[in-house]
Each structure stands twice: as structure tokens, then as C-alpha cells.
Image (spheres, rainbow, N blue to C red):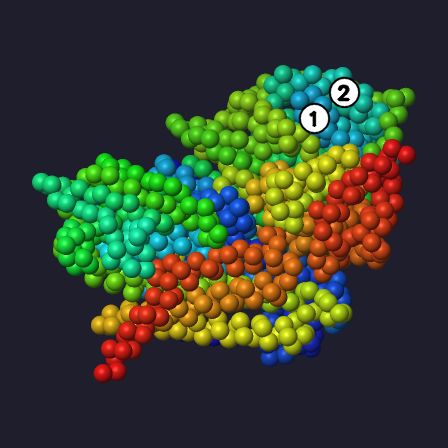
Amino acid sequence: MNIIVCIKQVPDAKDVRLDPKTNTLAREGVESIMNPFDRHALEEGVRLKETHGGQVTALSMGPPQAESVLREAISCGADQGVLVSDRAFAGADTWATSYTLRKAIEASGEFDLILCGKQAIDGDTAQVGPGLAGQMKLPFVTCVQKIRNLDDGIIQVERMMDDGFDVLELPVPALLTVVKDINDPRVPSLKGKMKAKKATIKILSAADIGAEEQCIGLAGSPTRVVNVFTPAPRGDRKMFTGSLEEQVDQLVDQLRSYL
Amino acid sequence: MLIIDCEKCIGCGVCEAECAFGAISVQDGCAVVDDNCTLCGSCVESCEVEALLIEEGAVQVQADINDWSGIWVFAESRHGKIAEVSYELLGVGRKLANQRGVQLSAVLLGSGVTESAPTLIAAGADKIYLGDDSTLGQYREDIYGNVLEFLIKKEKPEVILAGATAIGRSFIPMVANNLGAGLTADCTGLAIRAEDGMLLQTRPAFGGNIMATIECPHTRPQMATVRPKVMQPLMPDLERQGEVVSLSIPDRLLESQVKVLENVLEEHNQVNIQEIEVLVAGGRGVESEKGFKLVKELADELGGAVAASRAAVDSGWIPYAHQVGQTGKTVCPKLYIACGISGAIQHAVGMQSAETIVAINRDKNAPIFNIASCGIVGDLFEIMPLLTKKIRENKAL
Amino acid sequence: MDYLLSEEEQMIKDTAREITEEKIIPLRAELDEKNEFPTVILEDMAKADLFSIFVPEEYGGLGGGCFEIVLALEELARGCVGVATSFAASALGIFPVLIAGNEEMKQKYMPDIASGKRWAAFGLTEANAGSDASGIQTTAVLDGDEWVLNGTKQWITNGGESQIYTIIALTDPSKGARGASIFVVEDGDPGFSYGKKEDKMGIRSSATRELILKDCRIPKDRLVGRKGTGFITVMKTLDISRPGIASLGVGLGQAALDEAVVYAKQRVQFGKPIISFQAVQHMLADMATQLEAARSLVYAAARHIDANPKNMSKPSSMCKVFATDMAMKVTTDAVQVLGGYGYMKEYPVEKMMRDAKILQIYEGTNQIQRNVIGQELNKEYI
């Protein structure tokens, strides 16, 4: 069972603060972390490996310092890390990212399963997983909350829906995106950290994966950001006064239109 | 590539401060860019001496870009029932179609959905592409994708909108990918640019702290998933006329590699918090599963549903489906009452676009009060039962 | 203060902290309320290799000693002393095997301890043998190829949850303390069962239970070390383990100080945050100073013990007394800083104060520790 887990390095939301004066994001001192959903995908991959044997490869596309999330992945049980990194990838939207990941996976050999987090917390698009499945013509299921069984080339999963969940079966190789409910990720182990420190992360450039120039980076992206702006702030908040009971009365008054 | 003209650059450092990715530094009086650059372009705009330029390289413009016409809405249905968001999409789609002077069509796939087609016409559609087939009764990424892709290639609409729901966000990205089309996720604003008819798609980034407007200049169709509860549906007009086109779908498109064994409806999941107008949310301050009873009572009284912060979900007081925030759902109700929620950014990003936010918290310095429309500082175990009681009395009047 | 930790030491501290933040803190209030053993958290610790830190490398461990345990326990105690105690008790329970067991015995047990597959517990205390350990009444008699154990152990941490127990029993009652030996009893051994589970004031997530040995028959080779050397091994075990208990006090004190300072900055009275009042500042200053002094002493004692000196009892007892008395004081003061809120279960300092009390009692009461220090002083000055 060879598993590829796609991982993105993202800014840690807990460090992101709004600058009250300019109402823009203050990014100083913001640390980079493994996208939280990807931690769940990695944990699921490692658990599958522990039960079924095989290898877990952590794959990331990003700047050179994204290497650190791949080391973290190794400390959490991945066997190796592959970083696709090239200035030519800059400005990639979800289409160009899906394409690049496909080329990197094709350059990296056989696999049975690709696992992705449902979405990355910085972009929140949830598009790269399904896009990659489309690129690779793989059967896929998004928002998997549980892998029930894996046997004889058939994987049985629960897909979270807005009104409950569906139980589905599909053949491997396949791609799954996972939600938080699927597991409780382990913390990196001491022996894993030691292994990660020594590990060599494979770095692949655009040329290494044979990516076509017009399909990567900004040139390969059908979408363009034309404007970035800060929304108008909320009006002044209203605080009530008086005894607790009086305050509740004022609140009920305020809520009248919703009753 | 970001090109920096060292002749023009005065080494002022404005672009360095502007760069959100720490990719620019000023060295020896000239800005230098490193591998962290994502070509977002914010530095180019910030530069007062126009020393920065993004060079795109060769972009291939789709040859038949002018052949694509018409606005489409994917009308989502589940278990035979049309999702609310479909009507909202028709509402905004109608405006876009009128502006472009083109037809508004809806694609309706499912089993036994034929009788729902007129409600889509009443909600604004000119034409319904109807795929009523028992195979489509169970949603599967691949067959829904196959059918939509087939139809798009055949009919060439310029714009396709779908709800940013579990279903919309799962198969639409695959369709966009296969078509090589641009797709913008979870839009909260859509407009047509008058000069060239381009669809401008606005979406929140960093949970609404920043808004980004996106376009697809070189490719068609232009695709977007749209956040539920943001767009306004039209008043149903039963007099409206429209055309229903029954699709004959080639069998090969209906062959799925995914087998549905079971649909499990969960009682606590019956309400989708993204589609509810009033949410009462509990956080760490609610303290226990028992505490959530108070939250539920208030929600029931207001005809709303219960939501929760990550802290409450992680503590096991309420299932994940109720979680609002960065690793949960993004909601946009008319009224959001946050009880015992501090309002850290991870939670705020999931709810700050609510119309009215009420905060109840013991700590008057809690960040939730910064985004609240109004609030009460105090013990929620005292406030909530009182509030529930007073609302009940008020309704009785 | 920077204690100049090595890269590996820092790694241990970081890993324990990650366990605390991700696994312990979200669950601690519930475990405390329900009196529930943290099985899942101990499994998480095992996956993170925390149980391997004190196991020699030849048995699959990382080869650390007392100092490594201190670093880990300090971080775990910041989250919950009950959970940290369950971890500490497993180390305590296996120390006799590490100190006195033969190679065969170490081969049998240590790899499972290192991987966290099995946990241990230490069975010394009895109804009539608390501070005076020589009062134990459990006996062990050799019958052919088997030892037959009879007696009841009381208040055994991890009782009923661990799979490996080191039991102190008299093999020659006529010789008193010199007639005691240590045995390994495993969960499921014939005649071995668990009695009442205690309902405690604090550290409620840890399991405290009776062990009942009723004609409990175990193979001959379960004797740890030589017959009659039990008490020497017990004393050595406690000398090594006491800095661990002391570090629980340091971690707990740090957690209480953190809560108190954060609250004092937020809480406004008379128009100002209460941290701007000197009365509060002085309390916090004393808490922080005592805490840092305790940490320094515990680290120094642990490093001293790891150098394997002849006499380790005095520094071991000193750090236990000082750090646990500090923890009681600092947690009590933290409740005071939080005032009425501090007394409510909604805030964590209430639990911290309850948890602190046991630290002055278990693994030798602080009165007994002072006896040890006093006796050592008496010996040093001839």
C-alpha cells in the first residue's frame, strides 16, 4: 500500500492579527505550520501503513522553506518527503497547482492512494484535491470522515454530507480528501523527530517533473486576482447598561425583528 | 516573474512591508525578490516609482472564447429536494443574465426531479436542462461531473454557478479542471464588468479580513461556487415561462466507479447550519454537554439552530457538524448569538459576515465584542435562561 | 531562565509540551470530573516515544535518566498532574527492575515499557505501612518453583490499569526490613486481583486502587535481584523518582502562575487591570521567584543523581520538599489572585490547588523528607 499525502505549508491563524489602525492583516511573527486538515490526511495515511504495510510519501508544492513541513511529516510517520519547488510555479491558482502536483506524482512512481486535507486554511478553496483527481482521472471522494475498510483493491469510506453521511465504495488507486473527524492526529514522536532531522528531502524542479511552461505558475492559471481590498469595518457595537435583567430586556428589544 | 528595475528603485522598502509572504528585501538600495514570491502583485501596486512589474510570459488565450454565451446555474438537489442555495443562485444569475443580455439556464440532475423543474422557472430560469435518471438519484462525484462536463462542452455557457455546499465543492472543481476553466471558490459577490462583460468574482480570504476579486481573462467558461445565504432569491413568479429540455445522456457517462452503499441521515445533522437564519453558538464558556441545553433552548425559542466553537467540539460536548470557524463551517446567518465564545480569529473567520452578532461573555475584553453588533458582559448561565424566558414572553404578546 | 538544554533534552521537553497542549488540556476537566483514567492520552504518549526516554538504548529506549524524566513530567504537569502522575507511576514501577533486575528480566520487560505497550505500577504502601515502610505485612513464600504471595497493597497508583506490578513483600518476616524482597506480578496472575478504586480530592484522572494478593502464585524467576535486598532497592528507587515528583510541582506551579498573570492583566477593578496594583504584583513576584528557585533545585538535583553519586538521598529529598511546598503555595495564591472566579470550576486553578496537595503527601510525605535531610546532615557533621 503506497500512499501519497499532499501537504501545504500555511500561516498559523493563531498568529494572524488584524492591525486595529490600518485594519489590515499584521503578518509579522506569523509562523508557518502544516495545514491542519493535511495533518489528518497524514495521520490516516500512517495508520493505513501501520495496518496494511507500505510506504507513506509526503508531497508538497511550495517555496524552499516548505521543506520543514515535510520533515514534520516524517516525524509523524511518513517515510519520505518530496518538495516540488521552482520560481516558475509562483502565482499558481488551483488549476496550475493540480497540474503541477500531478506531474510530480507521475514523476515519483507507483501509488495506491492519494490523501489530501479537505482544504487549506489560507486559501479555503477545497479545489486542489478534486482538481488533482480530475487531472489524474482517478475515482475520488471528498470530505471523508472515516475509512471503514480496505480490502482487495476496494476502499469503503464514509463521506460527510450536509445532512449526515454516505457510505461509499470505490476501487484503488483513488484520491480521498479528509475532514477533521476522521482521526485525532498523533504528536510527532521523539524517534521520528530524530529521523526527520537526518532525512533528505527530495526537491523537484519544473524541469525534473517535465512540466510544460504554459501550464504552471501564473501563466498556467485560468484565474487572476484583479483586486484585493479590506472590507468596511462593522459599525460601533452597542453595549447595554443597567442591571442584568435590564440589559436582557434591551437585547430582546434589539432582537425583535428576528422573533 | 517579478521584475525589479534597479534604475528606478529608490530602496524605500514600501514593497518589503507590503509583501505578505516576506519575499522582498531591500539589499544595497534595491529591492530583491526570493522564492517565496507568489506573484500576488500587491508590491507592484504599492510601488510609487513604478519599479516593479510582473511579467506573465506567454499566455494562451482560448481560441473560441467569444463562442461561449449564457449564464448557467447548477440546481443542486438531494433526495429529490431542491437545495435552497439553488434559488439564491437563480436570483443572482438572473441579474447577471439580464446585464449580459443572455439566457439564464439551470441544470437539474437527479431521480424524480422532473416535477421540481417549474419551481426553478418560477425562480428565474429561462431554460432547464433536466437529467432525470435513476442512476443520478445518488450523488457521485464522477457521474455528476461527467454529465455536467458533457453538457458544458456541448452548449458552451460563459458562466457556471454552483452552491458552495458539500456537493458543489466536491465535483465542480473536477469539472473546471477537466475543462481547463477558472474556478473561484465560495464567492460572496458576483458582478459583470460593463466594458468587456467579464465576470468579477469576489471572495473572502482570511475569513473575510481581506476580500479578493478574481476574473478569468483567457478562458471559458467562468466558474464559481457561491456561499449559501449570501445571494437573494427572487420572489417566485408562477406566471414565468421557460423551456424544459430533457437530456438524453449517453450511458457511458452514467457509469460510476463509486458505489453508494447507504445514505445515513443523522438527527443532529438534519439542519445544515450554513442554511439557517438564526444560530446560537456555544463555546468553552458553556462548560459541558449540559450547558448546551441552554444553547439549544434559546435556539429553539428563536426558531434557529445550535452552532459551536472548536473548543466545545474538541471537548466532545457537541458533534463536529456544528463547528463554526476555520476548521469548521463558514456561516452567514441573519443573527448569530455567541455564548461563552472568546472570538479568536479562528472562530471569527467562520461567522463575522453574519448580519447581526450578539455576544454573551463573562470577559468584557474578549475579542468577540470587537466584532459583535451588541453584547452583554456577564454570566451566561444567568443571562441565557433569562433571555430565553423573555423572548418566549415577548412572542406571546 | 535558560537552562542550556541540549538539543535532545529540548526535543523531549517540546514533545511533552505538544502532548500537554494537544491531548491533555482539552480533556483534563472532563477526566477530573468523571474520575476517569487517561488511557487514550497514555497511548498518545507511547506513540510519541515518551515512555522510552528513561529506558536504556539496548532495550529500545533513548537512554535518558532522571533529568529527562524531570523535563517530561514538568511539561505534562502543566496540563494535568493526574495524567502526569499516571506516567510517573509507570516509571516508578519499573525502576526496581532497572536497578536490581537481572539481564533476563530486563529483556523481558523493558522493551514493552519503552514502546508503551505495557505500563507499570509500584506496590509498597499498605494499610499499616505508609511513612513507616518497614511495617509491611505482605509475605512471599517459596513453594517449589513458585513464590506464593499474600497480602493487600493500598493506594497503588495505576492499580488495575497497569500490566506490570513491582510488589514489596517479606520473604523473611523475622528479619524485619532486611527480610523484604521485590517481585514482579503481572495482571492476570492467579490469585492477583484489584480492590476498591479510591475517590480522591485531586489528581482524579489517576487510578488509585487496592491490589489483593491471595495465594498469588508466580514463577520463581519473578524475584527482582537477590532475596532480602528489597528495601535497599526501594530506597534507591525512591531517591531516583523523587525529583520527578518535584518536577510535577514545578510544572503545576508554572501552570498556576501562567493563569494568574493572564487573569491579572485582564481583570479590571477600580478602573485598572489588577496587575497594576502592588498587592497583586508582589504576590505574583513571590510566586515566580519561588517557582524559579524550585526549578533550579530540581534540575540540579536530577543532574546530580544522573551522575550516579554515592549519596543521592539528601538532594532528592530537598528538591521534593521545596518544589511541592512551593506548588501548594503558588496554586493557593493563584486561586487568591483569581478571587471568586478562582474558586469556581470554570477556571482551571481550582483543580490545580486540589491537585497540588497530594504532592506534599505521596512518595514520602514532606515530613519524612525533612527527616531524611536531617539525618543526612547529622551524618555529614561528625
In the shown orientation, is residue B255 left or right of residue A42?
A: right
Give the residue at mark 1.
B77
The relative height of residue C181 versus residue B395 in the rendered view (above or below) is: below
- As drawn, the label of residue B116 is 2
- As drawn, the label of residue B25 is none
Mark 2: which secondary structure? Answer: helix
Q: Position of residue A35 (x, y in %)?
A: 55, 51
- Residue at image point 78% right, 55% down: A231
Q: Residue furthest left?
A: C144
Disc 2: host chain? B
Mark 1: which secondary structure? Answer: strand
- Residue at image point 22% right, 54% down: C97
Give, as a three-letter code, the residue at label 1: Ser
Q: Residues within 10 Å of mark 2 (few under 14, many from 20)?
A: some
In the shown orientation, is residue C99 left or right of residue B11?
A: left
Question: C181 and B57: which one is in front?
Answer: C181
In the shown orientation, is residue A3 left or right of residue B271?
A: left
Question: C269 and A184: which one is in front?
Answer: C269
Q: Position of residue A12 (x, y in %)?
A: 58, 57
- For the C terminus of chain C, the quadrant is bottom left
Question: A42 and A183: which one is in front?
Answer: A183
* Residue B372 visible in this rendered orientation of the protein: no
Disc 1: host chain? B
- The image quadrant that residue C5 belongs to is bottom left
* Residue C305 visible in this rendered orientation of the protein: yes
Is there CB contact under 8 Å for labels 2 and 1?
Answer: yes
The relative height of residue C103 versus residue B42 in the rendered view (above or below) is: above
Give, as a three-letter code, the residue at label 2: Ser
User: Reading the chain from its start, which is encountered first: label 2 or label 1?
Assistant: 1
